[in-house]
Image (tube, coloured by chain):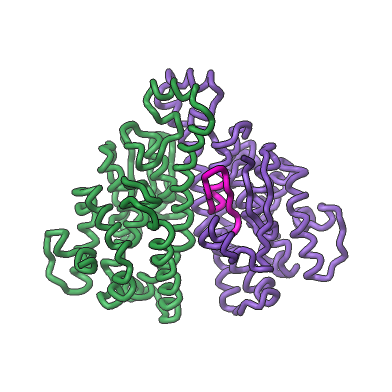
Chain colours: A green, B purple
């Protein structure tokens, strides 16, 4: 049975999972759960995810939600995912590797496990820092009024404080080593994809908010570009909906070309 | 080199890690980082954890923080941890198992990975639900005034709303299957330990707050007791500091016996 991905491309974690599946050549069916039509609250969707959120996946008997858990599951359960995305426990190596691994010293096994643990550490940090700033900042500036959700300047200011602190920690801790990606890696992991998709949501902000918040963080901007390039053309294709929404919300001309619509390169210049 | 655990027993994730190590017979050194003395802000500790939070571990060259990441790391990196805590990728099976696993069909491997993914799903949910209610609720009721941190009744009310909703979801989703533990399991996982330690923090609340918030959730209370019993006597030993603090904060007679000081059994009756 084909993997089913229930998602909504306007949601940042949905995009991370779609890009991940596409980049890794995983055969899946994309099922849109349109949040603007309340499809996430339909009983048939709550059978899959009782919390009524996107994304979720169904893979055979397994129903799974929470995007980080989904990313690590897909990385382990499907063949063909390159190891840099989520470094293997030894079991993920090809058969010969598994066989040899029996004779590996414990220290070698530990170094695999440690690489994976560092990725978990970033993903856990994401929950209580970057996401805790980014999601309410979008809500209390641009999204709330559009969706008819009450907003407050105090909540926006509080979210901005958490967001700036998170972006600053992202630069000083997680992007503080050689290598273009988080933790000093030379290739992206599921953490890069998850965090970059979070920040890409800022495309729909009012320009003055986006520039104030994001443009001081040049290392972050470069890393977003590096992640885009490493996952091109799927990154651009999956973000098209977001850039089209940006154009509609802010009455900008719709340009099909990703680079003309994205603000990242301009802020980097 | 011995595993070093940097922690403070008044912190709920610190307790989860200490109990986990003790239950699994892991050889480690406990190093107290006294938050009340600001030891988490000392440069030598920020060398280990630049965010200045507890817990952290040092294992050889690896410095790791974020309690969920630490729990899964220890479960994989140290021999002797029973599989129910964090179901193995196949690599964690004994040598013969690893050998045989090469011949296992993909569906069998997937079922291992799925079990682990479900635990990640609960842990991710913890970040953005239970913890997001529990930590500020403690802060804005009992802890803030003690620590000289400004509090507000609005923040306490908002935290209580998230907390009640989380406890209700815990019962209706995560504890909604047969089996004494989360996800219908018959033995605890790292998720049980992490979430139970979070809720145990409510021991220090004012009694009226604790009873109002927690006593309606009988399934949660029973699960806390089941987790305590499964990890006894380490659970009681590690929670002693918390119960002593409760006694001091609320001018209660200090009783050495855990069961006399803990409110869980009384609320279950």
The range drawn in magenta is B54-71
How many marks can you see?
0
- Position above or below: A242 against A183: below
Q: Is residue B68 magenta?
A: yes
* Foreground residue among B71 and A180: A180
* Foreground residue among A147 and B194: B194
- Position above or below: A86 against A136: above
The structure residue drawn at horizontal position 36% and vertical position 37%, both measured from the top left corner, is A83
* Foreground residue among B203 and A47: B203
Q: Is residue A141 magenta?
A: no
Left or right of residue A14: residue A69:
right
Where residue A31 appears, as percent x and y from the top left, is 29, 47
Q: Is residue B53 visible?
A: no
The structure residue drawn at horizontal position 41% and vertical position 27%, both measured from the top left corner, is B107
- Position above or below: B239 against B82: below
Q: Residue furthest bottom?
A: A153
Where residue B173 appears, as percent x and y from the top left, is 54, 49
Where residue A80 appears, as percent x and y from the top left, is 31, 33
Left or right of residue B227: residue B163:
left
Q: Quadrant of the N terminus of chain B?
A: top right
Left or right of residue B233: residue B51:
left
The structure residue drawn at horizontal position 50% and vertical position 38%, both measured from the top left corner, is B116
- Position above or below: A128 against B79: below
The structure residue drawn at horizontal position 45% and vertical position 76%, both measured from the top left corner, is A158
Where residue A207 appears, as percent x and y from the top left, is 25, 75
Residue B22 position by quadrant: top right
Q: Is residue A78 visible?
A: yes
């Amino acid at each position: 049975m084909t993997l089913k991905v229930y998602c909504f491309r306007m949601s940042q974690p949905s995009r991370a999972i779609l890009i991940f599946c596409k980049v890794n050549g995983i055969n899946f069916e994309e099922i849109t759960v349109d949040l603007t039509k309340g499809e996430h609250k339909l009983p048939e969707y709550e059978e899959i995810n009782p919390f009524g959120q996107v994304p979720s996946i169904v893979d055979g008997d397994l129903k799974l939600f929470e995007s980080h858990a989904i990313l690590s599951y897909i990385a382990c359960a499907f063949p063909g995912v390159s190891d840099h995305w989520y470094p293997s426990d030894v079991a993920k190596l090809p058969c010969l590797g598994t066989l040899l691994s029996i004779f590996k010293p414990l220290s070698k096994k530990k170094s695999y496990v440690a690489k994976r643990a560092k990725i978990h550490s970033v993903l856990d940090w994401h929950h209580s820092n970057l996401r805790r700033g980014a999601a309410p900042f979008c809500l209390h500036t641009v999204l709330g009024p559009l969706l008819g959700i009450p907003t407050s300047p105090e909540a926006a200011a509080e979210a901005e404080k958490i967001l700036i602190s998170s972006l600053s920690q992202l630069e000083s801790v997680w992007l503080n080593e050689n290598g273009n990606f988080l933790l000093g890696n030379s290739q992206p992991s599921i953490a890069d994809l998850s965090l970059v998709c979070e920040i890409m949501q800022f495309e729909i902000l009012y320009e003055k908010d986006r520039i104030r918040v994001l443009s001081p963080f040049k290392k972050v901007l470069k890393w977003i570009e590096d992640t885009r390039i490493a996952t091109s053309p799927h990154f651009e294709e999956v973000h098209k909906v977001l850039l089209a929404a940006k154009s509609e919300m802010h009455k900008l001309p719709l340009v099909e070309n990703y680079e003309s619509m994205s603000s990242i390169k301009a802020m980097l210049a």
